[in-house]
Amino acid sequence: MKTSLVALAALLAATTPARAQEAPAPENAAPENTDSRDIIVTGTKLSGDFGAKSGIPIARLPQSIQIVTAEDIIERGARSVGDILRAVPSANPGFSRVGPYQSFSLKVRGFLADQMRNGIRQRYYEDVDASALANIERVEVLKGPSGVLYGQSAVGGIVSIVTRQPEERQFGSFALTAGQFNQKMLTFDMNSGLAPGLAIRVTGEVERSGTFVDFQDLNRKNVALNLRYAPSEDVTAHLVAEYVERDTRRNPGLPLVGTVKSGIPALRRGLYLGEPSVDTLTADAPLVQTWVDVRLADGWTVTPRLQYQEFNSAFLQIRLRAPDAANPALITRNGRRGREDDSYTIAQLDLAGRVVTGPLTHKLLIGYEYDHERSRFTQFNLTNVSPINVLAPVYGYTSTPPAGTFAFDGFYNIDGHALYAQDQIDLTPRWNLIGAVRHSWIDARDGDYGGATNNRAKTSTTIWQLGSTYSLTDAVSFYAGYNTGFDVENTAGARTRTGTPLQPERSNQAEAGLRYRTGTLRASLSVFQIKRVNAVTADPVDPDFSVNAGEQRVRGIELEGEWQPREWWDLSAGYALMDGKVTRSNDGIAGKRIGDLPRHSFTARTSVAIPGTPLTMRGGVNHVTSRALVDGSDTTLPAYTLADIGLGLALKPFRIDATLSNLFDERYFTASGNGFAVYPGDPRTFSVRVSVGF
């Protein structure tokens, strides 16, 4: 089996690089935009600017970017944002849908990645339902810290989601998906022009499915209302209103023994080691975005943006801890019950236009952002959680109800302000320069809910970006850039020995690369170093407190490409070599490997449209080498190789897409975020999607 997998990978690699033309248009797709900035970037042909905000044409970004479209999502049978990231060789897709909050495991270039929606940062909205894909038009993965326009963001990069936009014509589609483990899902997409300049689009899905894990069902739904109103050529208004909801159990995963460590017989992947009679995880979130583009005189545009969202979740969670010293099959456990209720408001005001200084034209973006975050977290610690024998599980709460003691009911509030500016300069017709800077003021407070503030941290930080792209020929371009970012997630809950506030963690990335594009071939090569600095680590005087003295570093090379050797044959592939280690730490792990970062990763796909027939054959392979469980861990997650095959049949107005994922039923495990448990990867799974468009 291993030999056949290596042979399959070698075959795909030998015939891979990329798709020159666009994939077949999705159902009811709009006519192709002929903007001269169209470019294929290790994905599909797209036009326009990155992130629906930056104003930077994708071809001129001095950073690696990879794009996955709505059509790609269907063809690959992706079930979550993590599945989408399998197309990105330097990305870690994290654990599957059986885990609680998938976004906490999604990484790019060794570090966590944040999600944006239409150019505005999300705050835990994506954690409700990682499978809410119905309203996604495309996903743009920008690699490395990118906080100048987007504020505090994770080190690894940005997963920028662009939602479906209304059009002034009438079309729609319905799709039914069914598959193994009793999967049942209905998806819809309805669009209509209501009046001149006014269009509406409604998308959504409802799923009632089982999973490969015992006792764990997945009930989820999402709906989105998208409005676009253009009363004149100078004013265009947008409204995106979404709601997501998920109801499942909070799966604790599996222990290290019997999975990635020996000592007991191999455990079944579907084994549930929580308490199925009481475990729960419910979450819901509304999100509303609105922005208006108003053209002013002399080509300037002012754009006010506003986003409001919530994150509401209730849970009862059992956690796996260390095995019993005398009996490794007996796993100790603890647990908690609680809920979280958060609300987030982000307001932005952007002014964009052009200024001529001598022979140079500056494309400017100047903006202001206000953040208002209010979070409440209530927790009770369970006091009667018993150990469990994983070889013969006996659940403790089948006859005895859980008991607990109050732990805390706290708030965490943030008020933030920021000013930012970006300048794009065309030095020559072939050479452009991009510079940007942002200064943020953050006021963070926490304490007992309804009571006084216990801790307050007022900090400020400045980050910046500088990059350039030069076209060597019409086919070859070179880019280089240095960009920085900051994040307050890890500093929020840590305390210093002296009582002074911790500064935000900071990050930086230096990258250089080549892009090549012709009519049938697209390829890119990048070399990068990314650092997380000013990181939280133990205080050397008193390890119960923290200081900003940690550092981690990843160096790597990425090669990506697409090729269309024939009109009916598309291939794509990517490879990443990444070396990551903890360079500074007071936690005793300096010099050791960064957790959950493979040294080598490889992905490849092919699609063949059988000439003269409505049939398309698809296949792909994804290989990941071994990696440390968490930062500095001696526990290793084994390497794995996944393969999938698919079939597409277009019989207008009907369409059928079938996918068989994990073709060889590879047994593999992913990190859970702690050093006690792992999550099992999905076994071989078959699903079929039948859609009708009108």
Image (cartoon, rainbow, N blue to C red):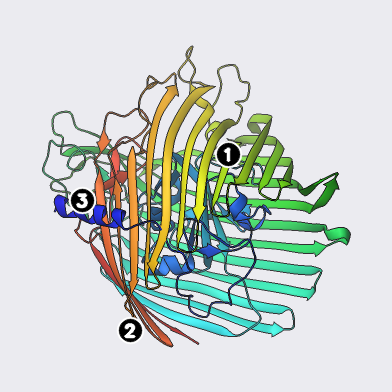
Q: Tag 1: residue type?
A: Ala
Q: Tag 3: residue type?
A: Val
Q: Please say if 150 is above or below 645.
A: above
Residue beneath the point at 81% across and 52% down: 354
Q: Residues within 10 Å of mark 1 (few under 14, many from 20)?
A: many
Residue beneath the point at 58% across and 39% down: 480
Residue 683 seen in the current view: yes
Q: Quadrant of residue 90?
A: top left
At which x and y percent is residue 192?
Answer: 62, 83
Distance from disc 2 to disc 1, alpha carbons, whole Å, reads 45 Å
What secondary structure is found at the residue carrying circle 3? helix
Residue beneath the point at 53% across and 66% down: 137
Residue, disc 3: 6
At which x and y percent is residue 652?
Answer: 42, 87
Distance from disc 3 to disc 2, alpha carbons, whole Å, reads 31 Å
Of pointers 2 and 1, the one earlier in the residue sequence:
1
Q: Is residue 326 left or right of residue 304?
A: left
Q: Quadrant of residue 333?
A: top left
Residue, disc 1: 480
**Front one among 397 and 578:** 578
Residue, disc 2: 613
At which x and y percent is residue 573?
Answer: 37, 54
Q: Residues within 10 Å of mark 2 (few under 14, many from 20)?
A: few
Q: Tag 2: residue type?
A: Thr
Residue farthest toward the front in the current orientation of the protein:
473
Distance from disc 3 to disc 1, alpha carbons, whole Å, reads 34 Å
Residue 451 seen in the current view: no
At which x and y percent is residue 70?
Answer: 48, 67
**Front one among 559 and 583:** 559
Q: Nearer the viewer, mark 3 or mark 1?
A: 1
Residue beneath the point at 34% across and 68% down: 607
